[in-house]
Amino acid sequence: MPLTIAQAQQNADIESGEPLSAETAQQLADLLENETTRTELIQALRRQAAPAEDAAPATADAAEGEAISLSRRIALATESIAEDLAAEFSSAFGAFTQAGEAAAGVDWQALGAASVDLVVVVIAVIAAFMLLRRLCIPVYRKLDAWSQEPAQTSALLRKAVAVLLAAGVDAVLIVVSWVIGFLLAIYALSEPGAMDTRQTMFLNAFLMIEIFKALIRTLFATRYEGLRLLPMSAENAAYWNTWFARISGFIGYGLLVAVPIANINISTDAGRALTFIVMGLAFLYALIVISQNKTQVRARLEGQAKQAHSTFARVGVFVLARVWHALAIAYFAGLAVVAILQPEETLPFMLKATVQTLLAVGGGIFLAVVLTQVISKRIRLPEDTRRRFPQLEDRLNGAIPGVLQVLRAIILVVVVLLVLDAWQLFNLPEWIGSEAGTTALAAAISIALILLVAKGIWIAFASWIELRLNPDNDRGGASAREQTLLALFRSAFLIVLVVMTAMIVLSELGINIGPLIAGAGVLGLAIGFGAQKLVQDVITGVFIQLENAINTGEVVTAGAITGTAEKITVRSVGIRDLSGTYHVVPFSSVDTVSNFMRDFAYHVGVYGVAYREDISAVIEQLQAAYSALIADPNFAEKVLEPLEVHGVTELADSAVNVRIRIKTLPGSQWGVGREYNRLVKQHFDAAGIEIPFPHTTLYFGEDRAGYAPPANVRVLEGRDRRAPHPAQAPAADAPLPDEASRPSERSDFDESQS
């Protein structure tokens, strides 16, 4: 019986100096006698000799710390796979020919009789599994209904629990069916304690394949929408569940049952030929199904991408929609290649890798969604805490998106590493145990803790500042100067915290921060020389704060702008004027600061009266207006001292000006002044004191004798341009006065003048 190259190499792998056994010598002789296998052996020996020729470069690389680089290993692995695949395809025709010759000598009648027990076990196990699943239909229905019930908890968590319970029931049914077949094969179809190899192979294959199908059913639950993880219709779920079940059953039972039986009962060439047939048909079937559903799946994935809330998820799903068919074809092509090159290890490896990939990806998505639903719930603080810290709740809720992004990034990295480990592209346990892996994990954990502590410190410090600024605290709130200094202190603390955190994180990453600190010093010096205006802003602002010239909330005049100071930084002040316009005034442009809110203020009023008025009476009315002002409790507490009457300050062109002054609390001078002006107007009107206002006098001139010329005044009755009063308006049908009854062009005022 001809051997493969792998079998010959395994049999020839003996210690140096030991003689070959008779069996091994016969196998090597058969190997060398066959021309095809002899050619393969020569090629294999040449490949093994190639690393020996490269021993010197490899030694040099090892001396440098790395024997073979990753790219070199990938190149060698790719070259080996290509050569092995070419050798297998070149010998495929010979395998089919030799399989036909070996099949001609098989006693098919005896083989059929020996397979009866296997058929009985197959029927018994499948029947038991189907019967158990039918008996558990009420359980599945209850889980389906329970998962869709409205509840206070997260719907996704409820559904996940239902899906896990249903998968657990499936696993129990599979194990029970396997035990039934195992007991039947041992005690009913064989001698007690003995079991046919073919039955064992089928039972093991049944256990692995049905477990894989159970995992598929958690994604595509055909009859139960509440147990279906993927969002799709029942028709689509049934289609994909059936397709995956067919192709996994065909490949699984073909490679784990049919091929080993052919190897045992016919020949290894027959097994190789059957492997080619099984994998070829499976690949063609998968290629057809993928091509038929390429556009439909792409459209569905793009629709899911548009509904995604996260930008990363949206981009990831959109990219998957464009390349999903290529990934699926590559998966089945890789499965076929591995099955052809390593038929004994193909299905266990692919099954393990696929299950680990599905669990990693599904678990990562599930964990990310659960974290999003659980953590993204708004934090509710007690009423007393919200009263003392009004912004703490918003600050805590504002930190949630950042925490979610970090957690999603960690989940993504872990999923990628698990997938690479599943396909043996990356050895995760070995990397974790290595020095580099330990260092990387320690650095990642340290950085995460540093960022978490920095965020906690900032929240605590900002909350303390907020408590000091809150007017409802036990101390009665902060003064204007405290508000200004605490706001500046908060900004400075944030800058220091960010810089220190960044430096510590860079240090944990292995970056030497000494040159960075030196570079920052040089950069600061360069900025000091180049940005002199900025330096002037900062220095002037520092001295303004040291002199307590401006505080937040005060009415000031700075840089020819008058208004309320709303925001003060180290280089500028933000002022909002009376019209609501917000001005940013750099401190370098401030020569003089006028503050209207320090210690006390005055309302200065200047009131003009006519020349004929008695000044003493005017002052009495001003005192009476002041008495009415302080009688109002809303204004009495704002007035600090009695009214100051300065007396007559100016004899103007048309009025005599009398000035008074009222001392008030800072910031109250405008309100007190407006109320006092109202009261003065009322008292002057009541006393008949005239407040002069502009008049227009008409002068018609006069002759030398002192007589004024007549004024031509014409009075029109009934034809006045102004609309007459309704009571005075003539009737519509009243006749107009004739010319005789009309007044003359000369009025009585004219006659009297003449």
Image (cartoon, rainbow, N blue to C red):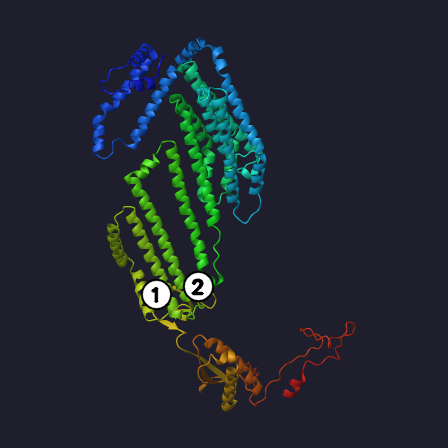
**Quadrant showing the C terminus:** bottom right
List x then y, in percent, for residue 446: 32, 48
Query: Which residue is drawn at the image coordinates 31% and 27% (left, top)?
Result: 75
Amino acid on which disc 2 is placed? Tyr
Which corner quadrant of the image does residue 259 belong to? top left
- Say if 582 sits above or below 378 in the image: below
Closer-to-camera residue (144/454)? 144
- Residue 540 vs residue 236: left or right? left
Residue 589, horizontal then vertical, whole percent: 34, 66
Mark 2 vs mark 1, CA separation in Å? 16 Å
| Classed neighbour count for the residue bearing mark 1: other residues with Cα under 10 Å, few (<14), some (14–19), many (≥20) | many
Q: Is 293 rendered above or below residue 442? A: above
Q: Relative to residue 445, is residue 24 depicted above or below?
A: above
Would you name the residue on which mark 2 appears? Answer: 582
Q: Is residue 254 visible?
A: no
Check disc 2 and report its element: helix, strand or loop: strand
Residue extending furthest front? 192
Q: Residue 655: horizontal and vertical position, in percent?
A: 49, 84
Query: Residue 501 vs residue 282: left or right?
Result: left
**Mark 2–mark 1 contact, CB under 8 Å?**
no
Residue 532, picture quadrant = bottom left
- Residue 543 location, x and y as percent? 31, 68
Label 2 vs 1, first from the N-terminus = 2
Q: Residue 473, labelled with which disc?
A: none
Disc 1, SS: helix
Three-letter residue code for mark 1: Phe
* Residue under pointer 1: 587
Q: Residue at x 48, y 15 (%)?
A: 114
